[in-house]
Image (tube, rainbow, N blue to C red):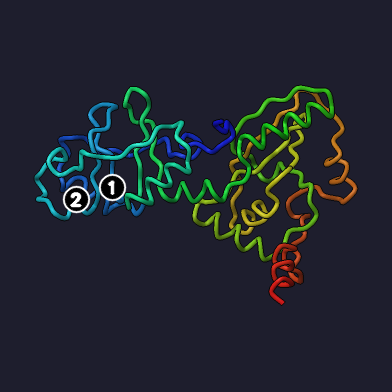
Amino acid sequence: MEDSNRPTVGDYMTREVATVELDDTVGEVARRIADNDHFSGFPVTDGRRVEGFVSARDLLLAEDHEPMFRVMTDDILVAHPDMAVQDAARVILRSGIQKLPVVDDAGHLVGIISNADVIRSQIERATPGKVDKLGRTLENIHGITTHEGRREVDLDDLTPTQTTVYADELEGRVYELERGLAEPLVVIDNGGDLLLADGHHRVKAAARLDIDEMDAYVIVLDETVELGMAETAADSDLESIDDIEVVDYAHHPLVQTTERLQD
């Protein structure tokens, strides 16, 4: 049976795709790559349809005046938004390419997924399915309805629900944020009060990097209720991210367990 909660290419692909056209010249495209560190190649399109892909390597072997339709690779691999990320990862690994154009049923370009996106999908644990499960749990416990969305949240508006984070794991979250690999937060909107349900290491890492907003799954409660996590936050005097303590003298429990197993 197909797992409806599996991560798909559509969940992780980049939707705003830089492309080049069939008549663009090697010189023009080479300058675009030279002017931007993020570009190593482009889908070649005719309107919305993908006709090929051109890489920096393709450009090195061609003359500046040559058009893309002569130097591009036209026998390309593509992904579909509903394709499992795991399957896309296999294609990327086995083919040795770095990016897969993503096309819909009509063959129109709708995104692109890279090896970095695949890595991010494995790091992320706050999947839409898990967020949906949390929403259903809140509905069952409190007899309310909820709806979910994904948006940027201002970190100053968040109330934490966890008193401490571990320095070891915090360093890992800083590394992920610096490389755009951090998973979204999970936030509960209870009558306008934004409770941080998951992502305390991430928000502390963001504060260290002077990041003011982060991507989040937001579960909105359709009516205000008394939440146990809100009471815990109040009892622990947690009002802002600054109130979360970074524990420098202790490793994460998983690290301690691993060390004991190695002794």
Left or right: 108 as drawn, with respect to 150: left
Q: In which quarter of the image is the C terminus?
A: bottom right
Disc 2 or 1, which lies upstream in sequence?
1
Q: Which of 69 and 121 is in front in this view?
A: 121
Badge 1 is on which residue? Answer: 41
Left or right: 101 as drawn, with respect to 82: left
Q: Quadrant of the N terminus?
A: top right
Badge 2 is on which residue? Answer: 58
**Residue drawn 40% across the image and 32% down it:** 80
- Report if the CB atoms under discs 2 and 1 are less than 8 Å apart: yes
- Classify 113 as above or below 226: below
Marks 2/1: CA–CA distance: 9 Å
Q: Nearer the viewer, residue 143 or 76?
A: 76
Q: Which of 26 and 57 is in front in this view?
A: 57
Q: What element carries label 2?
A: helix
- Classify 258 as above or below 75: below
Q: Which amino acid does label 2 sit on?
A: Asp
- Classify 195 as above or below 2: below
| Outermost residue, front side | 1
Q: Residue 182 carries which label?
A: none
Res 190 quadrant in image: top right
